């Protein structure tokens, strides 16, 4: 009994990413030993996939409504909110495009043939007019029931804006959505507690059926994701600071490094928010009003690193499956990844959930998520750092545009003076 209690206590005290790695390793081992008989563990993976699918619609909808309604202030906040969202969407589109470009050039998933039970049939090319028309749902309940993510996102944004515009009359419903979002965060945590077992089932089935050689490209996948993250921060963020803000990008990078390091070590945008606020205010000279509004919104809707990760991983999986994507598919990945990243909650496992949205849009089997789930923590560290760096970049630009950036502090910022945790 003592040993059992000790084992349970050790498991409960072990970090989730370590548990997933254990599940991955044991799944590979079981697949190698049992080979085709390892398919008996596949139901564990199927249950995990179903649970992820269960979360997508309510999590995206509630998180988006809460994120939009957090922008409460008539004129100035409306102006700041518009600039903030525009910059976040623009940088997110850049991020996923960089991920797609590097994956196309470096081909991390090339050379490995992989197939799943689900058929892979990319969607027929829709016209631009039909895409725009289909963004607006005729029946939002129907969109929610059928899991039409793009229509859900449009409806959630519209509802969030409307709740903000009606002021106090919307407070009761906003409170309901806020509570609902918190409940979904908790449910996500519960589902992710099952992730090690789900990954075990998926990897046992995959490695037993296809062999261990499918894992060889994972090291290259990690390298491509990290390279894309570094390029996005150094080229896109620094470029925006220099071109749009007419500011020294070196100061921005030095002033943000503490927050990026916290994000890298914790893999949590929400957990990095306190140090991000202090970096923006103390190191870069952004006013408390602007930083206190833009950064929390960014922690909710700005997920450049997640979008970049989605671009790389989707192409990685498509290359492994031997699926040739069309230009329309690439456009759909950029559009879906950009919009879906807005609804990515700052909770463990949300990146995998949003990845499944993008994969579903172009007809890739969701079981393939199990191939990358075991190294998701390593990828999460890099993409969270990008998310936080993007939050601080947008905060700095908005502060500059509103005349609420202390240039003396910015130009004389000293990262060593920032508090470290």
Image (cartoon, rainbow, N blue to C red):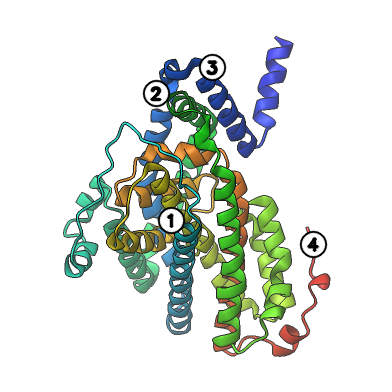
Q: Earlier in the sequence, mark 4 or mark 1?
A: 1
Earlier along the polypeptide chain: callout 2 or callout 4?
2
Of residues 280 and 354, the one drawn nearer to the viewer in this rendering: 354
Q: Is residue 103 left or right of residue 9?
A: left
Q: Which residue is mark 3?
A: 33
* Residue 353 horizontal/vertical position (percent): 44, 46
* Mark 2 vs mark 4: in front: 2
Classify 404 as above or below 147. Answer: below
Q: Nearer the viewer, mark 3 or mark 4?
A: 3
N-term mark: 1 or 3: 3
Q: Secondary structure at mark 2?
A: helix
Helix, strand or loop for disc 1 = helix
Q: Which residue is mark 4?
A: 420
- Please report whichever mark, 3 or 4, sits nearer to the chain's N-terminal start: 3
| Quarter of the image where the N terminus is located | top right
Give the quarter of the figure containing the C terminus: bottom right
- The mark closer to the camera, 1 or 3, is 3
- The correct choice, above or below, for 156 with respect to 252 in the image is above
């Amino acid at each position: 009994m003592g040993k059992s209690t000790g084992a349970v206590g050790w498991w409960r005290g072990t970090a989730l990413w370590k548990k997933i790695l254990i599940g991955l390793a044991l799944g590979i081992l079981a697949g190698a030993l049992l080979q085709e008989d390892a398919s008996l563990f596949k139901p564990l993976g199927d249950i995990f996939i179903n649970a992820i699918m269960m979360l997508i619609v309510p999590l995206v909808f509630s998180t988006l409504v809460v994120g939009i309604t957090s922008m409460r202030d008539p004129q100035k906040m409306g102006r700041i909110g518009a600039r903030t969202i525009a910059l976040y969407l623009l940088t997110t589109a850049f991020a996923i495009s960089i991920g797609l470009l590097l994956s196309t050039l470096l081909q991390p998933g090339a050379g490995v043939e992989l197939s799943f039970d689900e058929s892979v049939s990319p969607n027929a090319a829709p016209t631009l007019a039909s895409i725009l028309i289909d963004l607006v749902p005729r029946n939002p309940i129907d969109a929610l029931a059928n899991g039409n993510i793009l229509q859900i996102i449009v409806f959630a944004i519209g509802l969030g804006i409307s709740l903000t515009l009606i002021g106090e009359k919307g407070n009761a419903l906003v409170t309901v959505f806020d509570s609902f979002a918190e409940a979904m965060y908790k449910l996500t945590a519960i589902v992710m507690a099952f992730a090690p077992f789900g990954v075990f089932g998926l990897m046992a089935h995959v490695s037993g059926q296809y062999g261990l050689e499918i894992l060889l490209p994972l090291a290259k996948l990690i390298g491509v994701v990290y390279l894309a993250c570094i390029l996005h921060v150094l080229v896109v963020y620094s470029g925006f600071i220099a071109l749009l803000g007419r500011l020294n990008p070196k100061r921005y990078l030095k002033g943000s490094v503490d927050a990026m390091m916290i994000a890298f070590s914790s893999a949590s945008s929400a957990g990095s928010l306190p140090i991000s606020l202090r970096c923006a205010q103390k190191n870069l000279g952004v006013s408390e009003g602007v930083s206190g509004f833009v950064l929390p919104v960014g922690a909710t809707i700005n997920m450049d690193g997640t979008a970049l990760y989605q671009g790389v991983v989707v192409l990685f999986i498509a290359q492994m499956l031997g699926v040739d994507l069309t230009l329309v598919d690439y456009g759909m990945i950029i559009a879906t990844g950009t919009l879906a990243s807005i609804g990515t909650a700052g909770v463990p496992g949300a990146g995998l959930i949003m990845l499944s949205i993008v994969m579903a849009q172009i007809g890739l089997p969701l079981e393939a998520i199990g191939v990358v789930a075991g190294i998701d923590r390593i990828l999460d560290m890099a993409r969270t750092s990008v998310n936080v760096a993007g939050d601080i970049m947008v905060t700095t630009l908005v502060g500059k545009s509103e005349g609420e950036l202390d240039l003396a502090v910015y130009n004389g910022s000293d990262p060593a003076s920032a508090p470290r945790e």
